[in-house]
Image (tube, rainbow, N blue to C red):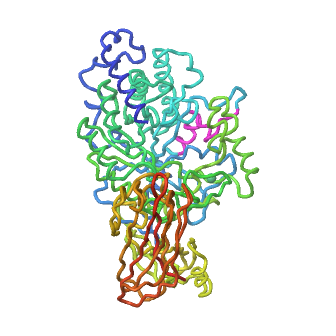
Amino acid sequence: MRKTIAVLLAAALLAGAFLTACRGAAPSGAETKAPGQESAAPGQETKAPAPGTDPSAAEPELTPEAKAAREAAAAVSSDTLYVKKVEGLPEDFILGMDVSSVIAEEASGVRYLDAAGQEKDLLQILAENGLTHIRVRVWNHPFDADGNGYGGGNNDIDTAVQIGRRAAQYGLKLIVDFHYSDFWADPAKQMVPLAWADMDIEEKTEAAYQYTKECLQKLRDAGCLVGMVQVGNETNGALCGETTWFNIQYIMQAGARATREVCPEALVAVHFANPENEGSYASYAKKLDYYQVDYDVFASSYYPYWHGTLDNLKSVLDDITKTYGKKTMVIETSYAYTAEDTDFSGNTIGDGGGIIKDYPFSVQGQANHVRNVAQAVADMEAGIGICYWEGAWITVGTSSWEENHEKWERYGSGWASSYAAVYDPKDAGKYYGGSAVDNQAFFDAQGRALESLKVFALLGKGNEIAPQPDAIEDAHLTVDLAEPVVLPETVNAVMTDDSRQPVPVVWDATEEELAAMNRGGAASYTVTGKAGDLPAVCYIEMIEFNFLENPGFETGDLTGWTVTDLAKADQLYVEEKVTDSKEGTWHMHFWSEQKGSVEFTLEQEVTGLKAGTYQFAVSIMGGDGGETDIYAYAKVDGETAGTAPLEITGYDQWHEGRVTGIAVQEGQTVTVGVYVKCAGEGNGAWGKIDKAMLNSQH
Ligand code: CA
């Protein structure tokens, strides 16, 4: 990724050097906005209102439905959902939700119910819960030659018009998300629409301009309230099949110019992902400034699983405001309310290694995520809002993959259909299926609104009710095999306000089951339990605790050990050589060419042991020993407690000596070690000592 950006940067700089020469050949669609032809980007002049305000301040007259929805939103309350008030939330803060899949979902039989269980238009439910904007992606032509949809909602402009019209009825503005592609555009993929595939950049720019204009005109004519227009989706260094900024910017300029002409009241947004990539946003913003791309909002995706911290997000977006005076927002975010999949098509985030970032996968966790993203954006220098991604993309059926698959294919309600293969054979054409985010929706599998949907209406005033346990943090125990397994009596509850409180827990494990863990050797166990109504899990690692320091010489020296060289060996030291080590990369090495010059002890003293029975083991290999006397030994308070004979028989032939039954009383000192004496023969005795262990005997 980084390399790609560096290459693009170099290409763009190179292109910049030839800018003057190229200007005359600028694509016609970008003529008026070609670099250097304007004294300042229009977005920074008269059209740019003060940061944080919406230029479409002249509100259209509200329909009766819109008025009723706003009243309902103002009256939203919850007995169970905790919402910490967002400090400094602007009145006109954008609370958006992308529901691009809704038409395909409804065609597939999905119905939406409000929290009270009453079936309503999804757009009405969203308006009644405080949403202000609806985001809709627009693909140029997501259909094959026979008219079969590629899926993902089959979102062409006509679909956007349908959604936008219904949104307007409830007073919801539209964020129009032009991908300038026939299907999904994201950091990994920015494919050119088929109809534009053979165009040069000049023709493509004109096509993008005309297309944007026609689309926006259709939305306008249908009475949609276009509040924002995105010129590209997650355009990290590519757009519409173009991969140099010199060309990318022409497409962006075309979209911006069309927007200014058709929807002058709308904000123009650019959209990027991966704020965690150091320096990437600053470099995009610099390019946009260099080419004087006309935009108002620098928008970012923010998925907590991948996109770094909110602090980092705020920092990189604030830098853009400080440097270029742009507004900022989170235009895509989401969080799982459950790890469960409900549509028989795997989810992006879920169980089986799913990453739980900061919050539990719970209805409350989902709301807390939204609330904290809103606070982070409200804290930004010029943060104007947030937009949740695909909050209503739920399962289209409850019985089987086959049932759902038939609907995904027919109505485009899955992320991709098999028909997408003609356009995107490598990804969509191969892995087509249902919703990968049904567990991140604000509606359950039956289409009923979750309590968390109320978070949008409650952000501004807060709902700081008494915190309740919402989920239980996993408990972890590491237990020496010689010690009894004692499960904790309390576990940490994650409270609805995201604080932690210890709560009593009852484990589903008998004394006999726990005792068996002591006999099972080094192993891992999972014990489940209940803390109130909430499930609890305790992970137990049964280990053989090694009381020796530096038992395998991995510190690279003799830390913990004492060597007594009784016959002046030629070589006697700790050595790094993985092939000569029993474990790790270091071991104790000895060698002597002279006959009779190998005699030494290597030992370690251990104090502070509890009373009990212990065992000591150590391994050796070597050769050319001649007559040898080698053994492992253990002493207690200086008295020999046991020995175990050892031998050296050749390379890689490790022998272990084990002294067992070392009885220790509290306060006694234990000394363990190896005695090595070799007469030597041939090239002289050599050897390697490694993997020492003193542990409880059980
Ligand atoms: Ca799914």
Q: Can residue 471 be seen from the camera position used here?
A: no
Out of 546 and 304, give the one closest to the viewer: 546
Q: Can residue 136 be seen from the camera position used here?
A: yes
Residue at the farthest bottom position: 665
325, above or below 93, in the image: above
Is residue 604 found left or right of 167 in the rendered image? Answer: left
Task: State how many labels appear.
Answer: 0
Q: Quadrant of residue 600?
A: bottom left
Q: Position of residue 316 (x, y in %)?
A: 31, 44
Q: Quadrant of residue 502?
A: bottom left
Q: Quadrant of residue 230?
A: top left
401, above or below 614, in the image: above
State which region is magenta. 148-166
Is 153 included in the stretch rendered in magenta?
Answer: yes
Out of 690 and 15, give the one closest to the viewer: 690
237, above or below 94, in the image: above
Out of 244 and 419, give the one closest to the viewer: 244
Please identify the quadrant where the C terminus is shown: bottom right
Q: Position of residue 37 (x, y in %)?
A: 28, 17
Q: Residue at x 50, y 26 (%)?
A: 240
Is 208 included in the stretch rendered in magenta?
Answer: no
Q: Position of residue 150 (x, y in %)?
A: 65, 35
Q: Position of residue 370 (x, y in %)?
A: 42, 57
Is residue 41 found left or right of 407 in the rendered image? Answer: left
